[in-house]
Amino acid sequence: MAGPAGPTPAAPGARRAAVEGGGWPARRAIRSLRPSFLFESRPEDEGLVNLRDNENPFAGPHRRYPDNTNRPLVGLYADALDVLEGHGAAAAAPPEDWRWGPETILLTRGAGDALDLVFRAFFEPRADAVAVTPPFFALFDELAAVHEVERLRGPLLGPGHDRLDVPTLARSGAAGVILCDPGNPSGTSLRQGEVERLLAAYDGLVVVDEAYVEYTGRASHRHLVPRHPNLVVVRSMSKALGLAGLRLGAVLAQPGIVAALRRARLPFALPAPVAAEAAAALADPAALRRGVEMFTAERDRLAAGLRRCPGILWVGAAAGFVTVRTERPASEVAGRLRAAGLAVLPDPMGWRGRLRFSVGEPADNDRLLAVLAENGVHIDEREGPT
Ligand SMILES: Cc1ncc(COP(=O)(O)O)c(C=O)c1O
């Protein structure tokens, strides 16, 4: 495991001891915090006049602070999960006493906010380390930098970038392993059982960013949560649900973890109009699922076209985009596409020699394929090396 020398990370054994004592251990500062604004209800709900919240009674429709618990929206999201994931409730029935609800789901301002909260609540600045699995989502690195948490690296293994280096990650001494499945920028999904292998071998927090899970053919790792107090699943409503402008995501984890995250976050996190818009969308999960299926059909069509394209050596298409490896340098291919009016991402998140393509409208995807087939990526033998 390559990583810069840094402060000594917390011993994994100490963490396991804390779990046995009940709940996953949050940072010292979070454990001792007594948040002032954990309001569960408004005075009006009890028939009282609200002289508590310093709102302006003379102002317009947005004068009230929003609901601080988001219970109705959590309920709608929880009810919609099986449909959104496309596997049905049969994927893995939770234990009898398990409930997906406000104790096990925290709604956040996007998956990015969810990841930030995990760092705020669980990783001690200038003491802890987290392990990431290159190629990895750049935000993990940025959050670790902001929160002054050391980064250790255990790259994804195999030609399909679909296996974890479990022994290395488990022995890393990191307080957490941050995974992205399906991966951005890899565009691949971990093989079945990889996360369970890590959970069996590792004592720290396992965070799985599943921003794109609705686009995969596999079940969400959330089904492992009831059996694993150290598993945190992060979700986004920006991608498959098509609600990027609302800025909504979620953390799914055991109640101790969700309670710590709630304490670590700022009060009144979700604006009322956002919650209302999301509630309207989540009220019809079947319509959202149809949108996911339209998207994946077009993504698969694009990926098939790319696989047929001379000079494309590898295609990863398990997430909400397609990543390819090309014969020609990625920046050169991106330059040619740009000249044809198409902006793509070369060397995504520092993963050299790859290009990441968003899934566009069919006509734009056809244009992409046409430009690539014409003169984009293939190195003609007569040209010699570039
Ligand atoms: C892997 C991954 N995680 C998290 C995010 C952030 O998602 P959100 O818009 O929900 O903050 C993204 C956005 O591109 C992503 O690709």
Image: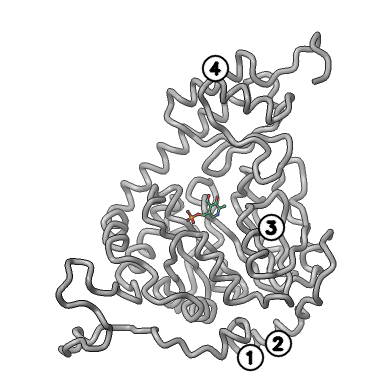
Q: In what quadrant of the picture does the N terminus appear?
A: bottom right
Q: What residue appears at the point 30 percent right and 74 percent down from the top-left corner?
A: 67
Where does residue 318 sit, x and y in percent of width and height?
Answer: 58, 42
Name the front one of labels 4 and 1: 4
Taking the image as shown, residue 112 lies to the left or right of residue 384, namely left
Q: In the rendering, which numbered label is found on residue 17? A: 2
182 versus 263 height, above or below: above
What whole-number distance in Å separates the C-alpha atoms at marks 2 and 1?
6 Å
User: Of marks 2 and 3, which one's residue comes earlier in the chain?
Assistant: 2
Q: What residue appears at the point 50 percent right and 59 percent down from the top-left corner?
A: 111
In the rendered structure, which amino acid carries the disc numbered 4? Ala
What whole-number distance in Å separates the C-alpha atoms at marks 2 and 3?
25 Å
User: Of marks 2 and 4, which one's residue comes earlier in the chain?
Assistant: 2
* Mark 2–mark 1 CB contact (< 8 Å): yes
368 versus 264 height, above or below: above
Mark 4 Cβ and ligand 1 under 8 Å apart: no
Where does residue 269 sit, x and y in percent of width and height?
Answer: 39, 70
Question: Mark 2: which secondary structure?
Answer: helix
Q: Say which quarter of the image contains residue 148.
A: bottom right
Q: Nearer the viewer, residue 329 or 296?
A: 329
What whole-number distance in Å separates the C-alpha atoms at marks 3 and 4?
37 Å
